[in-house]
Image (spheres, coloured by chain):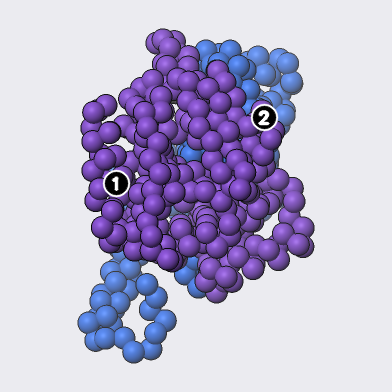
Amino acid sequence: MGEIVNVEKVGMKYQSLNGEINAIEDISFSVEKGEYVSIVGPSGCGKSTLLSIISGLLKATMGRVVIGGEEVLKNSDKVGYMLQKDHLFDWRTIYQNVVLGLEVRKILNDDNRRYAIELLKTYGLYEFKDKYPSQLSGGMRQRAALIRTLAVKPEILLLDEAFSALDYQTRLAVTEDIYSIIKNENKTAIMVTHDISESISMSDRVIVLSRRPAVVSSIHSIRFDCPKRTPLKCREDPNFREYFNTIWKELDVHV
Amino acid sequence: MSDTGLNLSPERIAYLKKVKLQKTATWLVRLLILVLIFALWELAARLKLIDAFITSQPSRMIKTLTNLYNAGDLFVHIGVTCLETIVGFIIGTLMGIFIAVLLWWSEFASRVLEPYLVVLNSLPKVALGPIFIIWIGAGPSAIIVMALAISLIVTILEMLNAFIRTDEEKIKLVETFGASRFQVFLKVVLPSNIPAMINALKVNVGLSWVGVITGEFLVSKAGLGYLIVYGGQVFQLDLVMTSVIILAIAAALMYQGVVLIEKKLVGNQAAQKHS
Ligand SMILES: Nc1ncnc2c1ncn2[C@@H]1O[C@H](COP(=O)(O)OP(=O)(O)OP(=O)(O)O)[C@@H](O)[C@H]1O
Ligand SMILES: [Mg+2]
């Protein structure tokens, strides 16, 4: 499988009246098609900035991002973004929320509508399609948010602390849920999290960033030999602790 | 939470009964206060405890009302004032929201215009009355412009503030789908600010009345404001009092109209949510 995302020597300096903030500096890595990569790092080190640059929402002041052979110059259609909260609009029904991206991209045709309905059916939200977000549980809302992202058929998913607004119990269940959906749909994922366990349990690789200005301080390949991998199974694996300790120490050094 | 279920517990029934009783009691006492005020007023005037020449009295007000009605003037005056208010209210609200949208759109424009808006907002608009009369002529148009002068700037400032405070993350969400500025407005900023808009409507109803009555004080030949000023000039307190009370009723009705619109806009959503 080839590389789908290349981050090449990306740096970002924010300008404001109070001065300049050197958020990230010279970050390079690549992600393979179908891979699940996590990014961990101290708070405020520039993780969200990095994701915004990869998606094309934000223009890097140095370096470039290449997705599928094309340099990202504006908001990329190949990328789907999951934010920290589900941000389902409470004036729209679940179905109307799910087709929001299609509406904005002006591709709300019968095919795509059918695909959205299909996703709702596959992931158990079809009966709720005419309900409003306030009638759904936190986990279901997160799933609806993921379907909203998947409906525009992105190749790469970016998740920015997408589970951190949930309580611990729900969070475990939702990561399990979302992980299986992402694998099922064969998507490439780049996830930012501050939860080391979460990053190990879900990803193929964990990228550890340093304190601001962020650089890549190390990359850890995560391998478990359980046949049907799920985040919960990984948490029980004997190697889990070892990975945890390594990454924790790595982070600790820089905090 | 719905009480449409048939098997309510006795506690629930007792509670609902209490709520209903309280509601009835509230309305009864409200009505009683009103009746009492007018009864005492009438009584005091008849017993010559107060001078009906300067305080008027309910029976004389009713007589004034019938006189106005018989002369065919009553609904002309009410109509003129209500029309001016409604036109001022609608133009003020629409124009205010429209200008707020433009200012939200162009950060540069809003930054440039900010001090002007602040000065205009703090200026007592009555001071502009004579200017409007000279420019537009002493007629209903000048009165409507007066109403606009009073409500427009407030609407602009209030709506602009609401637009600017829209949740940044929600905006980021539609931007991840590649939304243009126009789409951001249409899909996020506008729908999430419906409550703010309804609030602006409510404030505007009141301000439009202020504007129209002020305008009528200055120029008019008809309308409730005219009746009040005229009654004052010829020392006919009956006319003044009657007009004030009609005004109170008309203003209350129009406010209720806005509340009805609110229920239509917001209530529908809430009703669907709980279906
Ligand atoms: N629009 C902006 N203008 C100026 N500075 C910014 C802007 N956005 C972020 N920053 C600064 O850049 C740095 C990195 O921010 P970023 O949000 O990317 O970090 P993060 O790792 O996602 O943080 P967190 O762990 O809190 O989510 C922070 O110090 C922040 O204050
Ligand atoms: Mg962040």
Residue visible at 28% across and 83% down? Answer: B13
Q: Nearer the viewer, residue A32 or A125?
A: A32
Q: Nearer the viewer, residue B237 or B209?
A: B209
Which residue extends farthest bottom? B7
Residue A203 visible, this orientation: yes
**Left or right: A226, with B81 as reference point:** left
Amino acid tagged 1: Tyr
In the picture of the structure, the residue carrying the numbered disc 1 is: A243
Q: Residues within 10 Å of mark 2 (few under 14, many from 20)?
A: some
The C terminus of chain A - image quarter: top left
**Left or right: A55, with A198 as reference point:** right
Question: In the rendered structure, the residue with mark 2 lies on which chain?
Answer: A
Residue visible at 46% across and 59% down? Answer: A178
Residue A97 pos. (x, y %)? 58, 56
Residue A163 visible, this orientation: no
Element carrying mark 2: strand
Chain letter tied to blue? B
Residue A176 pos. (x, y %)? 40, 62
Which quadrant of the view contains residue B89? top right
Residue A54 pos. (x, y %)? 56, 34
In the picture of the structure, the residue carrying the numbered disc 2 is: A71
Which quadrant of the view contains residue B109? top right
Residue visible at 34% across and 59% down? Answer: A234
| Mark 2 to mark 1 CA distance (whole Å) | 34 Å
Ligand 1: does it lie within 8 Å of the C-beta at label 1? no
Question: In the rendered structure, the residue with mark 1 lies on which chain?
Answer: A
Q: Is residue A196 above or below residue A118?
A: above
Which quadrant of the view contains residue A111? bottom right
Q: Nearer the viewer, residue A4 or A191?
A: A4
Ligand 1: does it lie within 8 Å of the C-beta at label 2? no
Residue A212 pos. (x, y %)? 36, 22
